[in-house]
Image (cartoon, rainbow, N blue to C red):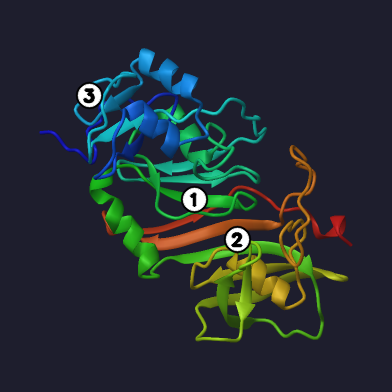
């Protein structure tokens, strides 16, 4: 039966499922004109090349041509491409896989999903290419700069049940971090605050006293050496950059953090100072099998002596 939302009119290619664009309810001209206006990052000659190769098709599998007229509401599918993409020289590891769930151990610097200048060099596309799993999808995400555990749904039929674990906060997550030590701060402690997107820097978050708290992290100090310490961080909520913001607000910015307390991006391709944050463990009751699950990362942060 035809499914306009997922017709699978193009196969997965090199780990990449086709992207979809929907023609609006009003318009004129050709499909080619619309694509050039809607997606200006792709040159007109590139759209013509893709059409000639049969790589732009509608939801019924009919290839688009340069002369095809605009058709309101019709979906078209195509493959996203990048002219150039640097290889990220660190490998992921699959720790667990069954018919419904996959657990990967991500290295620093590797994004979870395609975005901006990252496509093939993302955890999702690497895994789909290696394993041939078209429906593979992350049920949560961690930052590109963070290493450690990421859970994936293997099939769409049970994906919602794993997503509900995070939505309902029935997953216990443990992170490890290395940051300065302040002997005046007492641990264990709980940090609660309201976090909002920074209006001046969309990629950063900040704490504000206005409004009810929307982020909560349990913190503990597990090892200290001079002015440096290793911390266990357990987020209850899942705000973007939550652990980084909470630690920086205490005057304990994570080593290797290029965003907090100030933006200090390293040059492109500089992998010498990874963020000292690791998604160390995750624990939950599997919503499909009912079995208790606990997974632990095999990766290690740097030794405290490196920062002493």
Is any atom of residue 10 visible in this view?
Answer: no
Task: Nearest to the eye among marks 1 and 2: give it.
Answer: 2
Q: Is there any visible trace of residue 245 in the rendered image?
A: yes
- 280 is higher (above) or lower (below) than 71: below
Q: Residue at x 66, y 30 (%)?
A: 86
Residue at the limit of the structure toward the top, as seen here = 52
Q: Nearer the viewer, residue 289 or 255?
A: 255
- 19 or 170, which lies in front? 19
Exactly how many numbered labels are in the figure? 3
Say which of marks 1 and 3 sits in front. 3
Question: Label 2, on which residue?
Answer: 202
- The mark nearer the N terminus, 1 or 2, is 1
Whole-percent x, y for residue 294 in the image: 45, 58
Q: Residue at x 79, y 42 (%)?
A: 267
Label 2 – label 3 distance at C-alpha: 38 Å
**Mark 1 lies on residue:** 150
- Of mark 2 and mark 3, the one earlier in the sequence is 3
């Amino acid at each position: 039966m035809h499914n306009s939302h997922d017709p699978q009119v193009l196969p997965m290619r090199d780990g990449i499922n086709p992207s979809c664009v929907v023609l609006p309810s009003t318009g004129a001209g050709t499909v080619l004109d619309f694509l050039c206006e809607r997606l200006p990052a792709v040159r007109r000659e590139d759209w013509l090349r893709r059409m000639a190769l049969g790589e732009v098709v509608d939801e019924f599998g009919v290839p688009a041509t340069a002369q095809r007229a605009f058709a309101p509401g019709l979906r078209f599918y195509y493959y996203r491409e990048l002219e150039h993409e640097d290889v990220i020289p660190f490998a992921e590891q699959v720790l667990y896989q069954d018919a419904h769930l996959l657990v990967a151990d991500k290295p620093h610097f590797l994004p979870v999903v395609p975005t901006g200048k990252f496509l093939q060099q993302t955890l999702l596309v690497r895994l789909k290419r290696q394993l041939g799993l078209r429906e593979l999808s992350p049920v949560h995400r961690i930052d590109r700069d963070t290493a450690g555990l990421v859970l994936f749904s293997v099939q769409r039929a049970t994906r919602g049940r794993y997503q509900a674990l995070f939505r309902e906060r029935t997953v216990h997550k443990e992170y490890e971090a290395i940051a300065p030590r302040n002997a005046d701060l007492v641990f264990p402690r709980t940090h609660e605050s309201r976090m909002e997107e920074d209006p001046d820097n969309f990629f950063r978050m900040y704490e504000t006293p206005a409004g009810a708290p929307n982020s909560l992290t349990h913190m503990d100090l597990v090892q200290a050496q001079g002015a440096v310490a290793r911390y266990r961080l357990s987020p209850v909520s899942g705000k973007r950059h939550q652990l980084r913001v909470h630690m920086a607000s205490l005057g304990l910015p994570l080593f290797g953090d290029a965003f907090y307390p100030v933006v200090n991006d390293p040059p492109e391709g500089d992998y010498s100072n990874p963020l000292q944050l690791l998604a160390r463990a995750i624990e939950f009751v599997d919503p499909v099998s009912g079995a208790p699950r606990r997974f632990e990362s095999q990766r290690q942060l740097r030794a405290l002596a490196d920062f002493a």
